[in-house]
């Protein structure tokens, strides 16, 4: 039985006391001549859920894509500033981007399973790394599917096509595929916007458990979801970071009028 989601309140720590997963320093980004992010600095804590909110086009997805260098794939992308992860600046030209994307997993808005079996979807990244031992693959696939709350539903049909799964199951499969590589950070770009309310609740429950294993950053257009699931929330507007604090404070006592206007529906 799926229990109702219970938000974990931060009674002990605030952001200044948290261990750091990612530190962003004076980050600006543009595509060709179009500025998208402007001088963003923030510190994202370990083993917490951090939500990025703001109206469409404010830079949320662009910012989250900076954390595993996905923006590099877009022609004309130029950026300044630093993103510190594990003591190194991942924007450095010598950064091993393949290694980075193993350390920082990403799940997109719409499920994108490969046209392979459920089993091969989960172990795809491991095979790319040269892991082919059957015992190791079996153990990793099972653990990743357990972690993604999907094992019980698919354990008897692991070698069926992933395309037969429902939308919600496919999204959990994609999460399992990311978890198989044991990432330190999991990026979720509007992971439930294409799902029904019950499946959305499953994914939110899943996130609450996963943050014990990795730090989670979620982009969401749904402020109610951000308030339910996140420990911290950052509000962006026109490529600028307007306000960033623990979610309870931001949604009940925002410091900036712009934030208050957005969360109360005056614009956006």
Image (tube, rainbow, N blue to C red):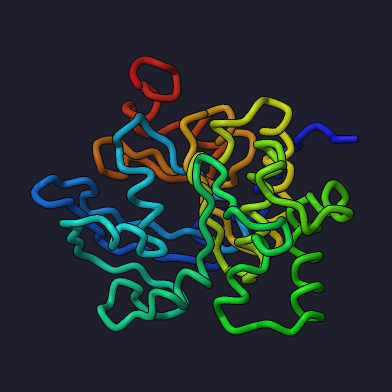
**Looking at the picture, how far across and down is residue 167, in whole percent?**
65, 36
Residue most extreme to the top: 266
Quarter-of-image position of residue 258: top left
**Looking at the picture, how far across and down is residue 101, in whole percent?**
47, 69
Left or right, 145 with respect to 266, comes to right
Q: Which quadrant, please, contains the N terminus? A: top right
Where 125 sits versus 197, above or below? below
Quarter-of-image position of residue 226: top right
Q: Which quadrant, please, contains the C terminus? A: top left
Q: Residue at x 68, y 64 (%)?
A: 120
Quarter-of-image position of residue 267: top left
Left or right, 92 with respect to 132, comes to left
**Looking at the picture, how far across and down is residue 64, in whole percent?**
41, 52
Where 5 sits versus 72, above or below? above
Tag count in the figure?
0
Q: Residue at x 33, y 26 (%)?
A: 257
Q: Residue at x 62, y 75 (%)?
A: 126
The one of 6 and 153 positioned closer to us in this rendering: 153
**Looking at the picture, how far across and down is residue 264, in whole percent?**
44, 18
Q: Residue at x 50, y 66 (%)?
A: 104
Residue most extreme to the left: 33
Left or right, 226 with respect to 241, comes to right
The one of 109 and 34 positioned closer to us in this rendering: 109
């Amino acid at each position: 039985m799926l229990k109702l989601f219970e938000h974990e309140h931060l009674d002990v720590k605030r952001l200044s006391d948290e261990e750091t997963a990612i530190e962003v320093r004076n980050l600006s980004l543009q595509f060709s001549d179009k500025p998208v992010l402007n001088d963003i600095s923030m510190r994202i804590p370990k083993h917490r859920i951090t939500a990025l909110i703001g109206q469409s086009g404010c830079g949320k997805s662009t910012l989250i894509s900076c954390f595993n260098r996905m923006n590099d794939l877009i022609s004309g992308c130029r950026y300044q500033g630093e993103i510190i992860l594990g003591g190194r600046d991942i924007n450095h030209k010598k950064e091993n981007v393949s290694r980075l994307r193993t350390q920082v997993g990403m799940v997109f808005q719409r499920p994108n399973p490969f046209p392979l079996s459920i089993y091969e979807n989960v172990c795809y990244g491991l095979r790319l790394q040269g892991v082919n031992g059957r015992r190791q693959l079996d153990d990793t696939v099972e653990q990743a599917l357990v972690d993604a709350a999907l094992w019980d539903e698919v354990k008897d049909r692991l070698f069926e096509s992933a395309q037969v799964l429902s939308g919600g199951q496919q999204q959990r499969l994609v999460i399992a595929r990311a978890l198989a590589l044991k990432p330190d950070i999991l990026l979720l770009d509007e992971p439930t916007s294409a799902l029904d309310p019950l499946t959305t609740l499953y994914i939110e429950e899943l996130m609450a458990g996963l943050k014990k294993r990795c730090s989670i950053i979620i982009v969401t257009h749904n402020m109610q979801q951000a308030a339910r699931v996140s420990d911290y929330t950052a509000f962006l507007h026109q490529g600028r970071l307007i306000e960033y604090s623990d979610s309870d404070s931001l949604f009940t006592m925002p410091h900036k009028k712009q934030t208050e206007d957005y969360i109360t529906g005056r614009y956006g």
